[in-house]
Image: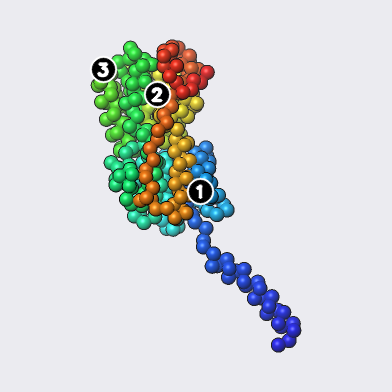
Amino acid sequence: MKRREFITLLGGAAAAWPLAARAQQPAMPVIGFLDVIHLPVRLAAFYQGLGESGYVVGQNVAIDIRSAEGRYSLFPELVADLIRRRVSVIVAPGTTPAALAAKAATSTIPIVFGVGDDPVKLGLVASLARPGGNATGINSFTAELAAKRLGLLHELLPAATRVAVLVNPTDPIRVETVVTEVKTAAGAIGLQFQVVNASTSSEIDAAFATLAAAPPDALFVGPDPFFYGRRGQLALQAARHAIPASYAVRDYAEAGGLMSYGTNLTDAYHQVGVYAGRILKGAKPSDLPVEQSTKFELVINLQAARTIKLDVPSQLLARADEVIE
């Protein structure tokens, strides 16, 4: 063989070696991220939790983000797309319909959820300690805390006799839980309540127009990701119609809402990220117990109270985890 031919052959082989090595390396795992609305702050919390397991998006893991933009009916289609992409794990950190759609679509791909309802009653897991299937995650109690929130609202307005409950009818499971809890709690403290539905921005405006015709003493806004995405609109309408309102998480109070009580959902997204990383490292969902939120926070916005000329009882202010001036 001539020297020039040998050098050319050697060079071609050397160029081929890296390609062969790359072909033998495992493909980068892909996380299917399923949520009802795109929330950058909570996504950042998920990334932080994922990083605690050694995974950095773009370096050693990829992510495929799918948002239903408030339309729960899209979840089955979005899950099907993620399954076709052969994702390594599906995370549904923010809403029950997303978790249920994922669970209904696959019994093999690991699922990490974040739900406010009881995951055992939902059929997502066999038990909290031993999930027993392909799903595990976080239970934030947002629906079950309805009774506690109503009690705090009654402390804020001890003379109240009638409360309106705003719910999103496109999530019937959550609506049933919230309405049942509120009904029981309202009966115990002698409150009458009416249910008002809204699933779009225009329906929120229409709901407040209905309430303005016969104003309730207070408004209880049901926990719902769609309402979370419209928290500024809700706070504005409540202030405009001078209706004292209670919300599920602190972000509502930070957006101008009067009062919130519930778990910190940003922490829940963080823990979902931790669990997703552990599963990518080889842990099985069936071996990871469902974690339950243990920290609940009361936030009161005094500026919102002054806007509607409401005096907040001093004993309630003393119990608040944060008072926004």
Q: Within 10 angstroms of label 1, few (less than 14), some, or many (20 or more) residues?
A: some
Mark 2 to mark 3 CA distance (whole Å): 18 Å
Residue at which label 3 appears:
190
Residue 25 at least partly seen: yes
Measured Cα–Cα span from mark 3 to mark 1 = 50 Å
Q: Amino acid at mark 1?
A: Ser
Kind of residue indicated by mark 3: Gly
Q: CA distance from mark 1 to mark 2?
A: 37 Å
- The image position of residue 293, as x and y in percent, is 40, 35
Q: Is residue 163 left or right of residue 46?
A: left
Mark 1 and mark 2 in contact? Answer it, CB < 8 Å: no
Residue 184 in the image, given as x and y percentages of width and height:
25, 26
Left or right? Give the position of 43 relative to 103: right
Tell me which amino acid carries mark 2: Ser
Vertical position of residue 95 compared to residue 179: above or below: below
Q: Can I make out residue 213 in this image?
A: no
Residue 246: which numbered mark, if any? 2
Residue bearing mark 1: 53
- Element type at mark 3: loop
